[in-house]
């Protein structure tokens, strides 16, 4: 009987002790998954654009830019996979610690329970229990012994349930650990596939560079023609905006615009201009696509000593027939046609202007009031390239659109 009580006391102490609890997996993988999904979506877009242009485009430079963007995204995707694998490895290590702690808890509970059952079996004769109670020195001791015995019975049942729960917790943790290891292996396989794809894309890029070097004279002529078109566009836009600002300041009505286009204007809407300025960094993109040439002056990716024409905006590669939308409320100030840029729409937002070029069709006319997100037209495919050229001006000063867009 003394052994039974000794075990009961030890089990009570053990039950009151603080046992290791399963570790909480603190790493939130949702943000990583969102980043990977965004990168994979961008790569799919570029794949679609490349497949549509590689066979038709007369400009290897355009293909090289798309491929360069794709390689950059692929490298970022590989890095994201590395971070995700490292995070999962940490979670696996934490889960392994949990499994070990649960196993130790189960071993201890099982050992106590086995001893409890064995001693209970040895003392299974009810007469022994009655003798223990009746052998008390007084009534108070007899009552305490009776309470101990009832508690012992309850504790034995309780410990049996704890053993069951601990075993279930352990089995669940082992299953989770197995699933994590399987996920980690899938991630590693996906990463290996991404690295292989990256190698292929770099080889493709090297082949394009070799092509550009081999036919340098041809592409130099294309570049010279492109420079003339860009410079003409920049001059035209600067002149159009100068006139728009002047007419807005004077409050006069518009006259026929450049290249046969139509124009209209009114006094500057200062309230609209303030609203436009307050949305810097929050304006929606005019199209869903990939920026292949950013604002400013850049060196040629192959002919390093050759500077490309200064870009007053951004060039965005898009799917064929992509819709172009106004980035903010405003008024269509003018629609013009430019060589190499097809139809262009100028929208005035008080003292700010946005310019949308390379449109195949236009669904607005000069003087129309437009709202944020309203369709202005559809992007045209020119020389095998389907790109929107977008500019944003503050008065007569061109701005980097990427500083204004989301």
Image: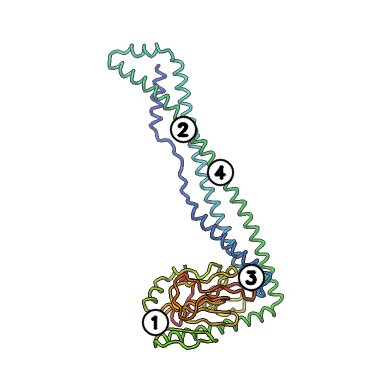
Which mark is drawn over residue 179?
A: 4
Dots 4 and 1: beta carbons under 8 Å?
no
The CA span between labels 4 and 1 is 63 Å
| Sequence-first tag of 3 and 4 | 3
Q: Secondary structure at mark 4?
A: helix
Q: Secondary structure at mark 2?
A: helix
The CA span between labels 3 and 4 is 41 Å
- Mark 1 = which residue? 268
Q: Secondary structure at mark 1?
A: loop
Q: Quadrant of the N terminus?
A: top left
| Sequence-first tag of 4 and 1 | 4
| Sequence-first tag of 2 and 3 | 3
Q: Pinpoint residue 381: horizontal percent, then vertical percent.
A: 61, 74
Left or right of residue 371, residue 84 in this image: right
Q: Pinpoint residue 310: horizontal percent, then vertical percent.
A: 55, 79
Left or right of residue 230, residue 203 in this image: right
- Mark 2 = which residue? 165
Q: Secondary structure at mark 3?
A: helix
The CA span between labels 1 and 3 is 42 Å
- Mark 3 = which residue? 64
The CA span between labels 2 and 4 is 21 Å
Which of 186/270 is in front? Answer: 270
Q: Pinpoint residue 141: horizontal percent, then vertical percent.
A: 30, 17
The CA span between labels 2 and 3 is 61 Å
The relative height of residue 24 versus residue 344 in the rendered view (above or below) is: above
Dots 2 and 1: beta carbons under 8 Å?
no
Which of 154/353 is in front? Answer: 353
Which of 20/395 is in front? Answer: 395
Dots 1 and 3: beta carbons under 8 Å?
no
The relative height of residue 323 versus residue 200 in the rendered view (above or below) is: below
């Amino acid at each position: 009987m003394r052994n039974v009580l000794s075990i009961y006391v030890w089990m009570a102490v053990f039950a009151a002790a603080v046992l290791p609890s399963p570790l909480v997996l603190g790493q939130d993988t949702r943000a990583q998954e969102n980043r990977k999904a965004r990168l994979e979506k961008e790569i799919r877009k570029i794949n679609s654009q490349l497949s549509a242009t590689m066979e038709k485009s007369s400009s290897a430079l355009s293909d090289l830019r798309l491929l360069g963007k794709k390689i950059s995204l692929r490298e970022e995707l590989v890095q994201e996979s590395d971070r995700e694998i490292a995070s999962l490895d940490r979670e696996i290590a934490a889960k392994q610690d949990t499994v070990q702690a649960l196993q130790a808890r189960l071993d201890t509970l099982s050992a106590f329970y086995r001893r409890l059952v064995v001693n209970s079996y040895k003392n299974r004769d009810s007469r022994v229990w009655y003798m223990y109670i009746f052998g008390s020195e007084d009534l108070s001791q007899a009552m305490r012994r009776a309470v101990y015995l009832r508690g012992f019975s309850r504790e034995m049942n309780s410990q049996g349930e704890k053993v069951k729960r601990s075993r279930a917790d352990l089995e669940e943790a082992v299953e989770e650990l197995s699933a994590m290891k399987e996920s980690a292996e899938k991630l590693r396989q996906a990463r290996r596939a991404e690295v292989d794809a990256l190698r292929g894309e770099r080889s493709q890029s090297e082949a394009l560079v070799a092509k550009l070097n081999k036919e340098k004279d041809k592409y130099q002529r294309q570049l010279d023609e492109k420079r003339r078109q860009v410079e003409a566009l920049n001059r035209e836009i600067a002149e159009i905006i100068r006139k728009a600002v002047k007419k807005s300041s004077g409050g006069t009505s518009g006259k026929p615009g450049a290249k046969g286009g139509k124009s209209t204007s009114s006094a500057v809407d200062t309230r609209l201009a303030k609203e436009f300025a307050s949305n810097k960094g929050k304006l929606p993109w005019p199209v869903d696509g990939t920026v292949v040439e950013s604002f400013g002056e850049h060196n040629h990716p192959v002919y390093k000593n050759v500077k490309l024409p200064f870009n007053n905006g951004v060039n965005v590669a898009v799917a064929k027939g992509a819709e172009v939308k106004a980035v903010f409320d405003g008024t269509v100030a003018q629609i013009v046609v430019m060589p190499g840029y097809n139809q262009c729409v100028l929208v005035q937002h008080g003292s700010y202007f946005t310019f949308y070029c390379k449109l195949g069709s236009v669904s607005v006319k000069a003087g129309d009031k437009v709202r944020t997100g309203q369709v202005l037209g559809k992007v045209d495919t020119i020389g095998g390239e389907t790109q929107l050229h977008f500019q944003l001006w503050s008065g007569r000063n061109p701005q980097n659109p990427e500083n204004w867009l989301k």
